Image: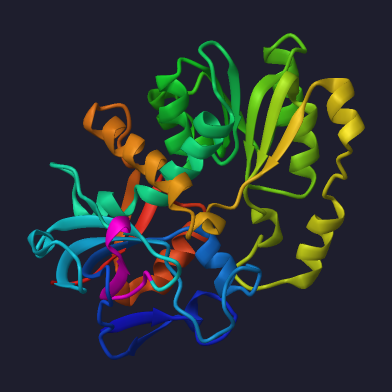
Amino acid sequence: MKQVQIPRYGDPDVLRVVERADPQPGPGEVAIAVRAAGINFADIMARMGLYADAPKPPLVVGYEVSGIIDALGEGVDPARLGERVLAMTHFGGYSTRAVVPDSVALPLPEGLSFEAGAALPVVYLTAYHMLIHLGNLHRGERVLIHSAGGGVGIAAIQLARWREAEIFGTASAGKHDRLRELGVHHCIDYRTEDFEEVVKQKTGGKGVHIALDAVGGDSFKKSYHSLAKTGRLFCFGISSFAPGQKRRLLSAARALVAMPLFHPVSFMQQNKGVFGVNMGDFWDDREVLQPQMTALLNLYREGVIDPPLDRAFPYEQAAAAHRYIQERQNFGKVVLTFED
């Protein structure tokens, strides 16, 4: 098989294609001939040496794939051979072949392409886990979504619209028209506007009930200050640690220093809460992931969600794909494709 490997930390150009022996499925596992693999910001952080959960180089990242089951381990239903599936992978997704537990490979819904299938699992699970599973988003509540034009952002917009919430979204001005078309009521240009002030103004000082923040640094503090009573802040990323395409420890240190310190007493006094979310930590927790993934596939079949695929790059152009995301050119999800 071929894999896109991170041989050492660095900018996108460190990525290289390597040849490895095909992995074989063990008992209860299936092998997938991968047709597409999703790219997430965690992959970029790992390439830069800023993602604590990632193995040391050389490593192959990738949390989600779609493709065709072409080999079965002992105990797997023979009828699964040749099935079109999507699956989450615990690293190793940037490969022409992936081996996963049988229960993780879920049938690709009718009408969903391989590219769109690889754009679904991580961003929708992240958004669903925060807004629905933990956030218990109700009709009429107000939601602040940072990086609203990204994969998780668009997934969250679709779910918030389904729950009939009032949506605030931060993004560069060039993305605002498309965000309004998706259902964002209040677009905020993070480059020229103070989102905390805009939220206060638009809500009459009441604030939002849920804030989704993967920026980190001072943004966590401002998002917390933007919460209404009963407000819930979800911290699920630290993109401010990686403002460029190479690791800059000084930038990461500055963002770390800007992080707020939260205290339980203030939570009680202000009726607010803060959640930390790392979906990769649930890899072995099927009781958490499987019901949510099943619910999401049903929402796709009902027309509630539609994977926000922006662009597909051939796997040989993985460096260009990473650069495209870091330059904030994407509106939605970016994936790698693999030949038949």
Q: Is residue 100 magenta?
A: yes
Query: Could you tell me residue 323's position as x and y percent?
Result: 48, 65
The answer to whether residue 340 is left or right of residue 134 is: left
The magenta region covers 93-104
Residue ID at (75%, 41%): 220
Residue ID at (29%, 72%): 98
Above/below status of 258 relative to 37: above
Location of the N terminus (image quadrant): bottom left
Query: Could you tell me residue 308's position as x and y percent?
Result: 35, 42
Please state the total of marks drawn on the protein image. 0
Query: Could you tell me residue 254's position as x and y percent?
Result: 83, 59
The answer to whether residue 273 is left or right of residue 156 is: right
Above/below status of 218 relative to 78: above
Query: Could you tell me residue 14's position as x and y percent?
Result: 50, 83
Residue ID at (56%, 38%): 171
Residue 88 picture quarter? bottom left
Q: Nearer the viewer, residue 23 or 38?
A: 23
Q: Nearer the viewer, residue 199 or 104?
A: 104
* Residue 177 visible somewhere in the drawing: no
Above/below status of 168 relative to 102: above
Location of the C terminus (image quadrant): bottom left
Above/below status of 89 relative to 84: below
Residue 62 picture quarter? bottom left
* Residue 152 visible somewhere in the drawing: yes
Q: Is residue 186 magenta?
A: no
Q: Nearer the viewer, residue 138 or 75?
A: 75
Give the colouring mode of the picture. rainbow
Residue 187 picture quarter? top right
Residue ID at (40%, 31%): 178
